[in-house]
Image (tube, coloured by chain):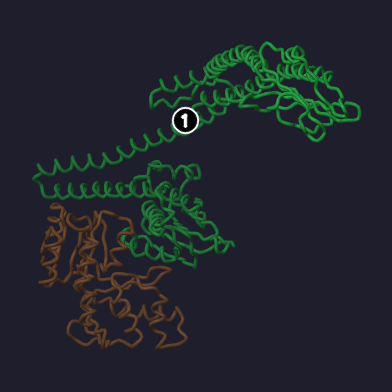
Chain colours: A brown, B green
Amino acid sequence: MRLLVLEDDPQVARGLQEGLTRAGFMVDHVVLPSAADQALTREAFDAAIIDLGLPQEDGLSFIRRMRAQGVKVPMLILTARDTLDDCVTGLELGADDYLTKPFRLPELVARIGALIRRNHAHATSLLKIGRLQVNLATHELRLDDDQFDLPPRERVVLECLMMAVPDVVRKDRLIQALVGWQADLTPNAIEVYISRLRQKLDPLGLGIRTVRGIGYRLEEARGTTPAG
Amino acid sequence: MEGLRHRLLRWLLLPLVALTAGSLVVDYDVAMRPANDAYDEALSNTALALSFYLQRENGQAVLKLTERADAMLRADRLDRIAFAVFDAAGRRIGGDSDLPYFGPADRNRFDDITLAGQPMRVAVLPHRLGDEALLIEVAETTHKRDELSRRVTAALAGPNLALILITLVLVGWGIEVGLKPLERLRQHVAARSAKDLTPLPHESVPEELQPLIEALNRQFALLAEALSSQERFLADAAHQLKTPLAALQSQLELAIGDADPASRQHRLFEMQEALHRVTHLAHQLLALARAEPSAGLQAQRQAVHLPAVAERMAQSHLDRAIDRGIDLGFELEEATVEGVPWLLNELLANLVDNALAYVPTGSHVTVRCGRRGQRPFLEVEDDGPGIPSTERNRVFERFYRMPESATGGCGLGLAIVRDIAAGHGATVEVREGGDGQGVRFTVSFPVPAATAA
């Protein structure tokens, strides 16, 4: 996995480079937007980390320019300006996620991992969480290299959860996904599917956390790095 | 704005001068009228005398004047006298040929005329001779009258001018004396130091200025309070910033010289903890500054869906709750408020942070939103140790931390909650939790305008 880091502060950049390298990424660091521009348009990256407070050109306008040039690499904004406004503007301009400074390395690694995974799934229709992989086009599930069979409704629920990682999926979202299969669905039925899924996923190092009052979240057992 | 002194001078002096000028005109008129009447009377007497020289000859009226009589009628020290007599049809019977006919007249009349470029006064008298109606005119130049007018004017101008001058001086002096207290106050204020916010003295200030002084003193008191609270805040903030920085520095220095890997590792964890405290404090100080009512947030207001705020918070705080072994749950019902989205996120995040920091492992923290009556609300309840009722109001003070609390919080979270709530016209209530356990913070928003209408 190759990352481009556009960051002008040398100390932050050193930390990012070392931390991301240790997490298994290949990291190219540039200081100037013009250099980032050349790298992104000429070479292939899996994701880019863009600092908003840049010399030469504002990070937001850089993102807008890159998207206008058709650069599709997933981008994560790093900013010390933590008003939500800036971040929302960034997302509207084409960034995919944001993190405010100061940040913790594990969180950055998790966000980048999720970003790459989602982008990859979008491009290849293949989404991999831990040892499980789902083909979003054929709805085929695989465990490592073998077929992994589930009843259709449980498969739909699992697919929804896998697509959302690391976010929580609302219960009513799961009900909507299942409406095509079963018209008179009660929230209790969802709980039944979740409980069955838990039993089957537990041995694979995957868990489903209940977020009381909102829904569910698929989690890998603690200690595994999402970036893999 | 123009000075008080100028205003007073202008509005006292302008009417005074106008009044004096008016009185001068009236005085002049009063002095001149009887004199002019007397001169007119003398003129008509000359006309009367002229009438004795009129007689009828062959049924025609004629003026028979001897040279001597003519000279007597025209005798005057200053003025030239002209006269003429006309019949009913305006034909000249006798007298000066340059004096025009000013008739007819049914009684004595006086007119101001101009004859050969000279201003003159003319008396026009109807006169009957037998059964014939004649008109006698006697005119004189106005030298006597002009001379009188000059003398009257001169006599009146002197005293009136003196009156105006004396008034000017008196008014100026009066204003100066009257404004003295104001000047004293100005000097007093000017002599104060910029930081002196003690009340201004009440005594020796005229009663018209008392309300101003009182208003100023109230303002000074508010300013002094704000300033001292600002200074306390800065002192507290500096203390709170320096404490973890000091910890960071000492652990860092020890770690550099520490050869034992286990102890070094321990120091690194300590440093991480100190760093986390500084980071958190920086974030909280910024949030507090941005929640200030003066931060111009009105423009950012929009409809905010409270369940969405709670869900965002779930995504960001779930991992911390899991790490601490706390069950973070939600009971979300529809509610929308008018507000600033990121501030409301900050408000809820602080309430949840607070709960997560103070409750022990195994506790439950529940976030609720919805409507009670018409009012939208946000609520965070826990079943932890709770807050003694004596502390409940103090927890909103900046940098206040509960006695014996061991958490790394900086004591700004609930102050931020209070400020943001106030900025949204909302109230914050602290109560015991549902089963008499723990604590419940409820933020009640005003009824949305659309619903209230």
Task: Please give left or right for residue B177 compared with residue A130 in the image.
Answer: right
In the displayed structure, does residue A75 sit left or right of residue A217?
Answer: left
Q: Quadrant of residue A26?
A: bottom left
Q: Is residue A76 above or below residue B180?
A: below
Q: Position of residue B394 (x, y in %)?
A: 46, 42
Q: Chain of mark 1?
A: B
Q: Nearer the viewer, residue A79 or A221?
A: A79
Q: How many marks?
A: 1
Residue corresponding to mark 1: B220
Task: State left or right for residue B323 relative to residue B329.
Answer: left
Q: Position of residue A228 (x, y in %)?
A: 16, 71
Residue at the image point whose x is 13% and y is 58% from the top? A31
Quadrant of residue A199 within the rendered picture: bottom left
**Picture coordinates of residue B96 (x, y %)?**
71, 24
Q: Viewer-proximal residue, B9 or B130?
A: B130
At horizontal 47% and vertical 34% (from top left) the residue drawn is B222
Residue at 38%, 62% (x, y): give it: B327
* Side (left or right) of A143 relative to B20: left
Number of other residues with Cα within 10 Å of mark 1, as a class: few under 14, some 14 to 19, many 20 or more: some
Q: Residue A108 versus residue A226: which sits nearer the camera?
A: A108
Q: Amino acid at mark 1?
A: Phe
Query: SS at mark 1?
Result: helix
Residue B322 x %, y %: 32, 62
* Residue B203 appears in the rendering: no
Residue B109 seen by the camera = yes
> B237 or A60, which is in the foreground?
A60
Kindly give the residue lying farthest to the front in the view shown.
B58
Outermost residue toward the right? B131
Q: Is residue B300 above or below residue B255?
A: below
